[in-house]
Each structure stands twice: as structure tokens, then as C-alpha cells.
Image (tube, grey):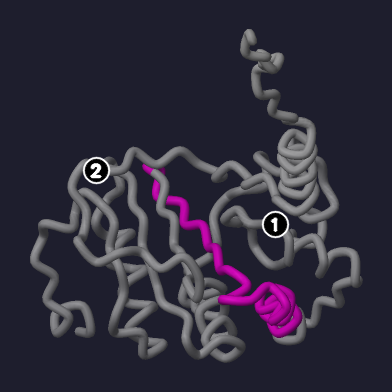
């Protein structure tokens, strides 16, 4: 009696559930992620930097361009619900007697690029188009009569005591500008910072800076 051969079928894998899952994940990432704003100035970073890793949060960054303009940035901390950037701008507004709207505070909170404008122009800056902001970026004032960079440091540390300082300098940045930023940090009792610049090989004597 001949053997009965059962019909053989090649296995079939239904990929539809997996494709649907990937589609849902992709849509979620697109809706929740934020595009990083470009930095206001290009900085030619050196190939060799400090071995100390730069913190992803709790960081205030000083960006020094090759024409010696100084830009400032600070993050929202380890949790965006803390709204550190919003609170820092409110403190700055109180100091300089500038009233910000909720829309302006929300925009500054979400704006994750460094700023380099005087406080007197920051309302106009926040309400301007991206293309118009470039012309306003003259750098944050550091004069002895109007040291706004010192105020940014003061209120950033007041709102977030765990914030750490990072200095990023262009390869063509003049050292006196870097030293001036260091002097301001020292005046505000910031004695530890990350220095990311071609000048990191220079031995910095903090006693000389304080003089």
C-alpha cells in the first residue's frame, strides 16, 4: 500500500504586526523629539580636549567665537519639568526690570541654542524670525559697568545649584577674552569648570587670574 504524502507548505511569516510596531515607534519619536537649534557661531574645536566628559545636563556653557563674542547657554536640568531656563530668565527679568510674557518664557525654555544678546534686546530677539536674530547677536556684555554675563551665572546657580560650567573657545579665540570669562566665574565662586579650547594645554594659574 503506497504511503500517503501530506502536502507540504512553506512557512509564512506575517510581518504586518512588526511593521505596525515600527511605524508607531517612528511616529512617537517624530512627535516627541525636538530639533537641536544650530549654534549662533561656528567654533573650530581642537582635536584634543579634556578627558573629563562634558555633562549632558546641569550645564551652563560659554561659547567664545573667533571674534571674541561671548554666548551663553544653560539647560533645563536632568528633568525638563523643572523648567530651569524659564526660571532663570524670570530672575534676569526681575533684575533688569523686564516683564516677559508666558509665550516669551516658553520660547526661551524650549530654545536650546546659545544666546549672545544684551538683556535690553532679548524680548525683540525672542519675538524675531531666525534669520533676523543673527544681526542681534553682538555677544553678552561683560563690561564692569554692565556685566550681564555675571548675572547669568549668578541666577543660573541660584535656580540650579548643581549647574556646572563649560567653556568652548574657537582655535582663534584670544586668551584675554577667555581669561575675562574665567575672572567672572571666579568672582561668582565658580572654581571648577570644563575648558574645551585650543588653550587647554596652557597651564592656568588661578592665583594669577584672581589678581
Q: Residue at x 56, y 68 (%)?
A: 74
> Where are the magenta residues, as a range?
66-92
In the image, is residue 48 part of the stretch drawn in magenta? no
Q: Which residue is mark 1?
A: 111
Q: For this rendering, which residue is in front, 16 or 156?
A: 16
Q: Is residue 165 left or right of residue 40?
A: left
Residue 122 location in percent, x, y? 74, 61
Q: Quadrant of the C terminus?
A: bottom left
Mark 2 neighbour class, 10 Å CA radius: few under 14, some 14 to 19, many 20 or more = some
Mark 1 neighbour class, 10 Å CA radius: few under 14, some 14 to 19, many 20 or more = some
Q: Is residue 98 left or right of residue 115?
A: right
Residue 28 location in percent, x, y? 77, 49
SS for dot 2: loop
* Disc ID at residue 46: 2
Residue 199 location in percent, x, y? 19, 54
SS for dot 1: loop
Q: Is residue 124 left or right of residue 203?
A: right
Amino acid at each position: 500500500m503506497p504511503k500517503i504524502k501530506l502536502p507540504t507548505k512553506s512557512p509564512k511569516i506575517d510581518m504586518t504586526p512588526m511593521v505596525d510596531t515600527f511605524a508607531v515607534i517612528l511616529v512617537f519619536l517624530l512627535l516627541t523629539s525636538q530639533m537641536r537649534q544650530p549654534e549662533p557661531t561656528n567654533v573650530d574645536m581642537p582635536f584634543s580636549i579634556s578627558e573629563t566628559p562634558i555633562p549632558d545636563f546641569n550645564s551652563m556653557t560659554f561659547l567664545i567665537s573667533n571674534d571674541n563674542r561671548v554666548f551663553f547657554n544653560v539647560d533645563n536640568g536632568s528633568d525638563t519639568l523643572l523648567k530651569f531656563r524659564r526660571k532663570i530668565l524670570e530672575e534676569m527679568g526681575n533684575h533688569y526690570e523686564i516683564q516677559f510674557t508666558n509665550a516669551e518664557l516658553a520660547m526661551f525654555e524650549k530654545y536650546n541654542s546659545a544666546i549672545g544678546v544684551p538683556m535690553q534686546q532679548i524680548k525683540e530677539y525672542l519675538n524675531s524670525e531666525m534669520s533676523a536674530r543673527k544681526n542681534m547677536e553682538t555677544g553678552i556684555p561683560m563690561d564692569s559697568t554692565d556685566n550681564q554675563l555675571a548675572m547669568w551665572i549668578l541666577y543660573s546657580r541660584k535656580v540650579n545649584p548643581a549647574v556646572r560650567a563649560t567653556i568652548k573657545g574657537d582655535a582663534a579665540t584670544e586668551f584675554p577674552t577667555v581669561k575675562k570669562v574665567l575672572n567672572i566665574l571666579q568672582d561668582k565662586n565658580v572654581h571648577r569648570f570644563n575648558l574645551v579650547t585650543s588653550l587647554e594645554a596652557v597651564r592656568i594659574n588661578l592665583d594669577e587670574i584672581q589678581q
